[in-house]
Image (cartoon, helix red, strand yellow):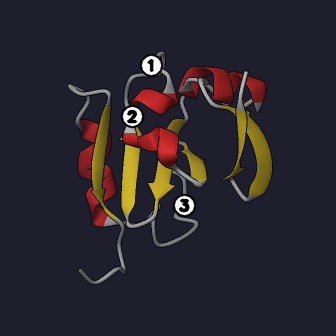
């Protein structure tokens, strides 16, 4: 199984390429109500499908991941983005992707 390196909640870790959000949450002992948010260059992805391999989504290309709980205080510009709340509400697709805040296009 191939692995890659990414930062998860501020810690640089080696991750299996084919892991899912649920497997990552379980391995890192994160609470069940946390949502995985991935940052890939100028994109932010909110993962809705907990059982789909991250490599099958934009989220699989991320170099930074955050786990966010409901009503958690904002820790950075990504987690405080106004687009995040609407992305969290949308769950019809495997993930919701939007432009990273603070980047001019």
Sequence order check, earlier mark of 3 and 1: 1
Q: Are marks 2 and 1 in contact (CB under 8 Å)?
A: yes
Instruction: Pick out the residue farthest to the front.
Output: 2
Choose top left, top right, bottom left or bottom right for residue 93: top left
Screen quadrant of the C terminus: bottom left
Q: Does residue 12 appear left or right of residue 80 in this picture?
A: right
Identify the residue at image location x=20%, y=25%.
92
**Which of the labelled discs sits on residue 52, or is there none?**
1
Give neighbour class at mark 1: few <14, some 14-19, many 20+ (Cα, 10 Å).
some
Residue that carries the numbered disc 2 in the rendered image: 57
Mark 1 residue element: loop
Sequence order check, earlier mark of 3 and 2: 2
Identify the residue at image location x=38%, y=47%.
45
Is 99 drawn above or below residue 59 in the view shown? Answer: below
Q: Does residue 74 appear left or right of residue 42 in this picture?
A: right
Instruction: Pick out the residue farthest to the bottom.
Output: 104
């Amino acid at each position: 199984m191939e692995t890659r390196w990414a930062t998860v909640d501020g810690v640089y870790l080696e991750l299996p390429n084919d892991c899912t959000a649920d497997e990552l949450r379980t391995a890192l002992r994160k609470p069940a109500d946390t949502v995985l948010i991935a940052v890939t260059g100028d994109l932010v992805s909110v993962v809705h499908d907990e059982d789909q391999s991250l490599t099958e989504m934009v989220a699989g290309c991320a170099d930074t991941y955050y786990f966010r709980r409901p009503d958690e205080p904002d820790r950075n510009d990504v987690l405080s983005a106004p687009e995040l709340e609407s992305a969290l509400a949308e769950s019809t697709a495997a993930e919701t992707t939007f432009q990273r805040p603070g980047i001019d296009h």
